[in-house]
Every structure is written in structure tokens, then in C-alpha cells.
Amino acid sequence: MTDITTLKNVATQVRRDIVRMVHAVQSGHPGGSLGCTDLLVALYFSEMHHNTNFSMDGKDEDIFFLSNGHISPLFYSILAHAGYFEVKELATFRKLNSRLQGHPTTHDGLPGVRVASGSLGQGMSVAIGAALAKKINNDKHLVYSLHGDGELQEGQNWEAIMFAAHKKVDNLIATIDYNGQQIDGSTDSVMSLGNLKEKFIAFGWDVLDIEQGNDMEDIIAGLRKAKSLTGKGKPVCILLKTKMGKGVDFMEVGHEWHGIAPNDEQLAKALAQLPETLGDY
């Protein structure tokens, strides 16, 4: 395991990358990207057994699927710093002919990306399929996935969630970014999700809460607890309570920064709160 201080330094640099990438093209989704940074740092730099010598089949390694693909700035920064491609490529985010489009895609062969995502509600089905494939191939590694809470308003998720329990897909850990916000407001005001924990339990899943979803120690402990529950006949869900815009104080206000870019002045304020730790691209 990478030490906690190093993980926190990586998270700071990733957040710095996110705001710079979105600012540079005045397009993208900083809020959820900042909120989920600590989780993906913990996964890729501590808890997931993955291989930067990338192959689409993902045999003999843990694999990850990003379902809420609009938080691509986070995903790209993580992959670059983990060694899947050069960090300098982050400067091409959302530009013409770039491999780093607004939602991750597969046609340009970007290492680390196994599925096009961003059409919300589909990632759960993909992750379950990959987990079943690992079972068929006697591959004991795990499948991880990340989903937005607002994304669970899509009905396809619940068919997949029911299917996963029925088929005992117990090599899957699905994390829900439980920040209570989506592009048009709070999830409660747009369409209430009710008691997500009780819903997943009723559908036959094991469920864990990580109450401090932006605390690295709590995330590491939660992921390890989730891993201890795998292989016991049930898929595992983590409800990760994060704050949208975490790390930039003026972005931690609600849903407002879901999908807007900072201007020059706002970028300067954000970067003042996010010291360079690994070197800028």
C-alpha cells in the first residue's frame, strides 16, 4: 500500500489537473470529478491490482469501469499519473482529434478505458458482464465500478442490480457517489432516490457506508472491508458520501459546479488551494 501522505499528495495534484483541464477548454464537469478524486486515487494507487501494460480483456487483474463518464477529467488524470499514458497528454483534453474526449471512448485506443461511458445508467450492466466473464474464466480478480447517485434514476440500473444478486456476482464492488447532487439540483428535488441502502439490501446486495467519502483513511478502510465481503455469494455496494467540488471551497456549494468551467480568476483561486505536488503537465 502507498502511504497515506503520498496518496493525499496524488489527490491534490489530480484535483489541480481537473480544474486546469476544464478551464483550458471552458468545458467539462469539475464538481463530481473533484468529489470522487479520493476514491479513484485510493483504488489505482493502493487497493486495486491492475496492470499499466493495458489489454482490453483485463485477465488476471482487477478492472475498473467508470459509469458516470462525465467525470472524465478525473479518470484521465488518474490514468496518466498511474502510468497508462504520458501526463503531458492531459493538455489535449476535449480538443479536436484528442483521445481525451468529454466522455471516455474506446475507438482511439486510450489505455485504461474499456468501455465508452457517459450515457448514464449503462455502467452497472457492463461491470456485471465483466464480473461474470471473470467467473467463467476462473479469474479470481475483482471488478470495480463507479456510478453517480442521480444516475440511479435510470431504470436499467435496477434490472442489472436484481440480475447481479440472482446470479451471485460476488466479485463486483460497485461504488455510488452519494453526494445528493445532479445537474439540475439535488437528487431529492429532481427525483428522490429514497433509502438507497435499504433498496440495495432488498435487492440482495451487501452494502457498506463510507460516511467520510473524501477522507483517505476512511476510504481505504471501506474498500478493504468491501473486498473482505467478496466471494460470499452477493455483489457488494459502497455508498460513498462525498462533497461535490471537494478541495475548492467555492465549488463546494451544491450542484452549481456540476458542469461549468472556472474563469481565469476562479482558476487562480482554485489553484491557490491546490498546491502542485507531482508537477503540472
Image (tube, rainbow, N blue to C red):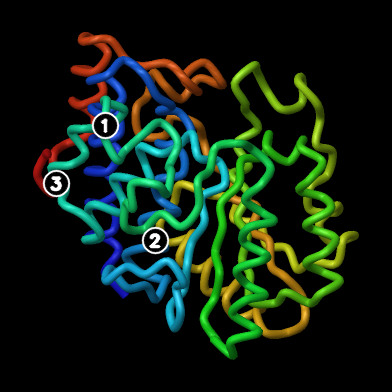
The quadrant of the picture occupied by the C terminus is: top left
- Check the image and name the residue furthest to the bottom: 138
Considering only order in the chain, which callout, 1 or 3, is on the residue closer to the N terminus? 1
Residue type highlighted by circle 3: Thr
Considering only order in the chain, which callout, 1 or 2, is on the residue closer to the N terminus? 2
Secondary structure of the residue carrying tag 1 is: loop
Q: Residue at x 54, y 64 (%)?
A: 144
Q: Quadrant of residue 112?
A: bottom left
Whole-percent x, y for residue 244 in the image = 50, 31
In the rendered image, which residue does mark 1 sit on?
Answer: 97
Secondary structure of the residue carrying tag 3 is: loop
Whole-percent x, y for residue 157 in the image = 76, 48
Label 3 vs label 1: CA separation?
29 Å
Residue type highlighted by circle 2: Ala
Considering only order in the chain, which callout, 3 or 2, is on the residue closer to the N terminus? 2
Badge 3 local density, few (<14 within 10 Å), some, or many (20+)? some
Secondary structure of the residue carrying tag 2 is: helix
Image-based side of 141 in relation to 200, left or right: left
The quadrant of the picture occupied by the N terminus is: bottom left
What is the number of the mark on residue 243?
A: none
In the rendered image, which residue does mark 3 sit on?
Answer: 277
Image-based side of 143 in relation to 73, left or right: right
Front residue of this view, candidates 85 and 245: 85
Q: Do callouts 2 and 1 mark residues in contact (Cβ within 8 Å)?
A: no
The label nearer to you, 3 versus 1, is 1
Whole-percent x, y for residue 270 in the image = 26, 23
Q: Residue at x 72, y 74 (%)?
A: 169
Q: Residue at x 45, y 36 (%)?
A: 103
